[in-house]
Image (cartoon, rainbow, N blue to C red):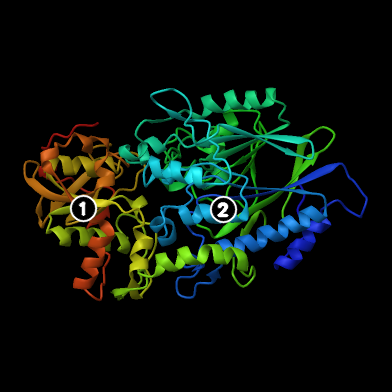
Amino acid sequence: MRSIQKTLLLAVALVGFMAVGSGQAGDDDGILRLHLMWTNDMHGHIAPEMAKFMNPEHPPPLGGGASAARYIKEVRANAAANGEEVLLMDVGDMFQGTPIGNKTKGTAVIEYYNAIGYEFAVPGNHDFDMGRVNCERLAKLSKFPWICSNLYEESTGTYVDWVEPTLMLDYQGIKIGVVGIITPGTAKMSFPDNIEGLEFRDMAETIPIYRDKLKDEGADLILLGIHEGLPYDPDKGWKKLAGENDDDADDLQGSRGSNYSGGGMNLMELVNVVPGIDIAVGGHTHRGYHHPWIDPMNHTMCFESFGNGSSIGHAILLIDRETKTLVGYDTPHGQGTLITLFEDELWPDAEIAEVIRPYHDEAEAEMNKVIGKAAVSMGRGDAGANLVANLVTDAMIGYFNADFSFQNGGGLRANIAQGDLTTRDIFSVLPFGNELDVVEMDGRMIRRIIERRVVGNSSGIHVGGAKVVVDLTREDWDRVCSLEIAGEPWDPDRLYKVVVTNFLMEGNSGLDFLTTIKADKIMPSGVTTAEAVEAYIRLNNPVRPEIDDRWIASPGAEQADYLKKAYLPET
């Protein structure tokens, strides 16, 4: 595999494209160069924003979709001049997670995709967050097809009529067959009402069916566009897959565990058991790869970017014209396949900026309102050292004067910087619009929740109104050593007033047993978590959460007698 000489500026990179093109005028080295460009996990990040994830205090500006458009247009122009081809694609989670995405229910993102000219898109699990009807609306609004081969109607056993299972592309006589896949974990991660009547079929069983169909139709290469991702650490992920470090259960997906997506397997596992895929572009895990991971056995070339609109992926696929096989790849610069969309390096394209601007202005009008101050910066750490979680769970307690609250870590999406707090800041932390339920639970159910979240290598949940000591060296389902709720020792028979999101009450995040709680014990409040947090900030301004003793992991801790006597089911 070759790589172009390292460049720092766009202009130099584009000269590099020409340097690896067709050579001198009239020369033909027998290689078709296909510029593969992709986005994954955009989550509505098409507007300009500050890259707080890089530097919370002095974040560099990102140009959003308009900067991406500048890059895309220049690549297309240079590719055309060199007799090369360009493919632009997206693999899901397109709109949910920003004001412009949520408030337009995805319309702004699709109109941007239409304007810049995507070839196709694959739906992701979060594209159903506003319901399947809205997801279908967005697919029909798109001027490009949505490709998904494992999304079926339960009632008919056929794939839904607003997607296509495959796509055949032709580049100068080279036929590329595209198979689209959504993670089957969508069935576990979405509200049942949002995906009612839909079936998400097994990936490893579905792909070969459509791979072979495309091959029969004359496809030279197979491209898998998939909303499922690669491991956080590729080396450890492969060692785990190869059976070289069976003791480390987390290696395939880092701290979230090998099966964190709920999809049955990750992309690395999938391409290892399903041969015949030449290129795969993944997402869902937000794990950026500067160079593709290539399966040692089946030689599938796998790409993925970090997501959230911070970059666009770009790899130059090298295809032998005579044999019609993939023989390698180039990168647009020496740092690999990911192009960070710094506004000062990629000045926003004026035409596309005008497409985005009216949606952005409308969505942002109410987001700049200052609601209070943060006396300290707040980060997201583990269960015992997480100021963002402490703020949120305390706000849940305070709004309803409850005894106990709990929140899953995956629902907290951003850190909070010291200083003025705006509606936008809170939205960044809590973008999903989950509403809070007030639930009457006995002590046994609360302990069961905590024990479930520390089974195996799980790190726990975030809690309010409690003091928890766990010993992760103890047997599963008996790891809680000390538990106080509302300032008193835990009582298995006491009925507690508990606040939790409706997302968790639907049985998500491994808490399926919550669905057994009777309806007369549940009071839907209609209040979103973000609304409760904003109210808490106004009442406690400036907010100053602290790391406290609400969650302590203490190996070898002695278990309290009142916990030893309590019966707890193990399922």
Q: Residue placed at 65% from the left, 63% from the top?
A: 70
Task: Indicate which disc residue 113 carries.
Answer: 2
Q: Nearer the viewer, residue 89 or 237?
A: 89
Residue at horizontal 73 percent and vertical 34 percent from the top: 175
Q: Residues within 10 Å of mark 1 (few under 14, many from 20)?
A: few
Judged by depth in the image, the label closer to the viewer, 1 or 2, is 2
Residue 430: x and y, percent? 34, 58
Q: Residue 226: x, y in percent?
A: 54, 39
- Disc 1 to disc 2, C-alpha distance: 33 Å
Q: Is residue 523 left or right of residue 86?
A: left
508 left or right of 116 in image: left
- Residue drawn at 33 percent across, 68 percent down: 423
Q: Secondary structure at mark 2?
A: helix
Looking at the image, tell me whether mark 1 or mark 2 is earlier in sequence order: 2
**Residue 54 placement (x, y as % from top left):** 51, 66
> Which residue is identified by label 1?
526
In this view, 313 is above or below 365 = above
Q: Secondary structure at mark 1?
A: strand
Residue type at tag 1: Gly
Taking 156 as reference, is 309 above or below it? Answer: below
How packed mark 2 is, by other alpha carbons closer than 10 Å (few <14, some 14-19, many 20 or more), is many
Residue 191 location (% of width, % of height): 32, 41
* Quadrant for the C terminus in the image: top left
Q: Is residue 223 above or below residue 532?
A: above
| Quadrant of the rendered image containing residue 420 | bottom left
| Residue drawn 44% across the image and 68% down it | 361
- Is residue 548 visible in the rendered image? The answer is no
Q: Amino acid at mark 2?
A: Tyr
Give left or right: position of 567 versus 387: left
Dividing the picture into quadrants, the one containing residue 503 is top left
Residue 197 visible in the displayed image: yes
